[in-house]
Image: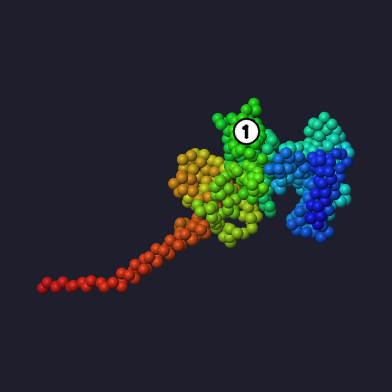
Amino acid sequence: MEMKIITFSFLICLFSKLQGHCKSDINLGFTLPLSAPIEYTPGFIGKAYIMETETSSRREPSFKAALTMESSEYKGRYLCSIQVFFGDVRVWSSGHYTKMYVSSKCIFELTEDGDMRLKRSNKRVGWRSGTSGQGIERLEIQSTGNLVLLDAMNMIKWQSFNFPTDVMLSGQRLDVATQLTSFPKDSTMFYSFEVLRDKIALFLNLDKLKYSYWEYKPIENKTVNFLRLGPNGLDIFDDNSHRIGRLEQPLTRFLAIGNITGNLGLYSYKPDKGKFEATFQALSNTCDLPVACKPYGICTSSKSCSCIKVMSNGDCNSNEEEWLSMKRLCDHEMVELEGVTTVLRNGTEARNVSKERCEELCKKDCECRGATYSVSEESCVMYGVVMGVKEIERESGLSYMVKIPKGVRLNDEKSNVRKWVVGLVGGIDALVILLLLSGFGFYYIRKRRKSLSQPQPQLQEEPIAE
């Protein structure tokens, strides 16, 4: 069924090419239906391309707008949306925030009164641009990838650039208080890239919790007004439209947040490889990512993951929802993990306090799951989630503490703490240590056997004086 849809999409473009080009706009009254397979098919993706930008160079792909249907987590239902593609990369979707589900057919239309809509087979509208009666004359995809509705004076009445998703295209602008968002599959948390007055930052969002894990501040603490992505990278401007900062990278075509890692990347097109590649990443170290390991995991210096076994079953491979559930931790104790910290920032902070006071503050707060203490700043930062934990130098002056079930430490001895809160060495580290110990053991046994095989000097007894 998918092959039929692709063939149909090709014929639409072929008909336009007979007139010299592939259309980059459509007029009022246009309708396009897209049908699902007769039987529900997991993994199904169907596309019907409606428009394509003209490109003067074959060294870079064009932008295409398409009506799409994709199988969803709900058996028997498909996600229906309008999407913009840059080559094979999806750079915008009408269903990024508002999901529209259909069972058999998805219908795209640009009505006679200028409203762009998605409808189900029963004619019920599931998504719309809301531009009825605004003098719309056509829908166009511009050379920047911006999907726009234009009136008779070529004035933009609606544009996809005003509804950012997880991608920012070259030529696009983000004002203060706007953001890009990325939603990991089968997870309650999400990532956001936000434009604030004093900085731009990446955030991890979980229910009501929100922590940054990467920040960039402009020079001389200038106030941020908006961002614009250009061919030389991401530019930051103040209230007077003066550039006050830049994440520089030549030939940048788009910026995106990874929905798995949460990393921010600037992407360029590689003609020799025929694909886009990240030529800049905000976080180059794996352990600086908030999800380098699962919740209650530690990213070690060897980039492997160790487990902090504080749950009743001590299983770091258990369901993510169990780890991230917001159960109140009231009757628990604190334990310090040496040589680790968290990449998360913006927790609840208390200043001019001792480490002991920091422990008490987290222990009394039923929403607190872990805390970081800085000796030099005498500050305590508390977190409602144990994530982004990584190994650091022990002499850093930072202490990281987590809550554990009350009573797991017998006689309050460190040996028992280590028994319940498993060490910081991951699988690879443990293997290296095991090999070293085995080598030393083999060397010692061989040396011992060699020494025993050699004749030993006889000791003479001294005469006893009478």
Q: Work out whether residue 95 or residue 275 is closer to the camera in this orientation and state it.
A: 275
Residue for point 68% across, 38% down:
170
Neighbour class for label 1 at 10 Å: few (<14), some, many (≥20)? many
Quadrant occupied by the N terminus: bottom right
Residue for point 38% across, 65% down:
443
Q: Is residue 281 above or below residue 313?
A: above
Q: Amino acid at mark 1?
A: Ile
Q: Secondary structure at mark 1?
A: strand
Quadrant occupied by the C terminus: bottom left
Residue 248 percent across, percent down from the top left: 59, 37
Residue 216 percent across, percent down from the top left: 58, 37
Q: Is residue 234 above or below residue 258?
A: above
- Which residue lies most toward the left here? 466
| Number of residue marks | 1
Is 386 left, or right, of 66 in this rendering? left
**Residue for badge 1:** 236
Q: Work out whether residue 312 or residue 164 is closer to the camera in this orientation and state it.
A: 164
Residue for point 60% across, 50% down:
291
Residue 97 percent across, percent down from the top left: 74, 45
**Residue 168 occupies which quadrant of the picture?**
top right
- Which residue lies most toward the top here? 240
Structure colour scheme: rainbow
Residue 54 percent across, percent down from the top left: 76, 40
Q: Confirm whether residue 257 shows in the render.
A: no
Q: Confirm whether residue 439 shows in the render.
A: yes
Residue for point 59% across, 48% down:
290
